[in-house]
Amino acid sequence: MATIRPLNDKVLIRQLESEERTKSGIILPDSAKEKPQQGEVIEVGSGKVIDGKVVPLDVKKGDRVVFGRYSGDEIKVDDEEYKIIKEEDILAIIE
C-alpha cells in the first residue's frame, strides 16, 4: 500500500460509507447514494505556517470529522478513495 502524507495544513480523509437503506427501509442503488460528508482522518500535514512558525493542526489521525460537501479533492490510491482537504474546510470533530 502506498503511503500518502499531506503537506502543510492539508488533511487526508477516508469518507464513511453512505447508508444503503432509507429510514423507511427502501434499498438505494449505488447511483442514488450521496457521498457522505463525514470521514475518518487518515493522515495530517505538519501544520499551518503563521508568522513564520509552524502551528500544529487541531485534528489528529483517527478523528471522525464533518466537512463541507464540495470541499477538497478526491483521489484514488490502491483502489481506495480519499479526500484531501484543508483543515479550515473541516466543520466539526465528532466525539
Image: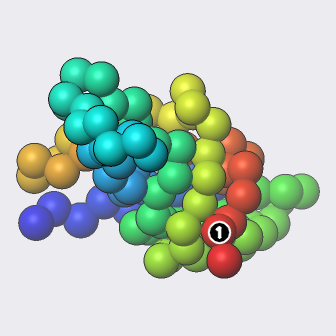
Quadrant for the C terminus in the image: bottom right
Q: Residues within 10 Å of mark 1 (few under 14, many from 20)?
A: few
Task: Give coordinates of residue 40: x percent, y percent.
Answer: 45, 64
The structure residue drawn at horizontal position 30% and vertical position 59%, both measured from the top left corner, is 4
Residue type of the residue flagged with mark 1: Ile
Residue 22 visible to the viewer: yes
Residue 30 drawn above or below residue 31: below
Residue occupying the point 20% across, 30% down: 30
Depth check: 38 or 44 in front? 38
**x, y (%) of residue 21?**
31, 44
**Image quarter of residue 49:** bottom right
The correct choice, above or below, for 8 with respect to 26 in the image is below
In the image, taking residue 12 as reference, residue 78 lies left or right, namely: left
Q: Residue furthest top?
A: 31
How many labels sit on residues? 1
- Image-quadrant location for residue 60: bottom right
| SS of the residue under disc 1 | strand
**Residue 50 to residue 64: above or below:** above
Q: Residue at x 52, y 52 (%)?
A: 38
* Residue position marked by numbered label 1 in the rendering: 94
- Whether residue 74 appears in this view of the structure is no
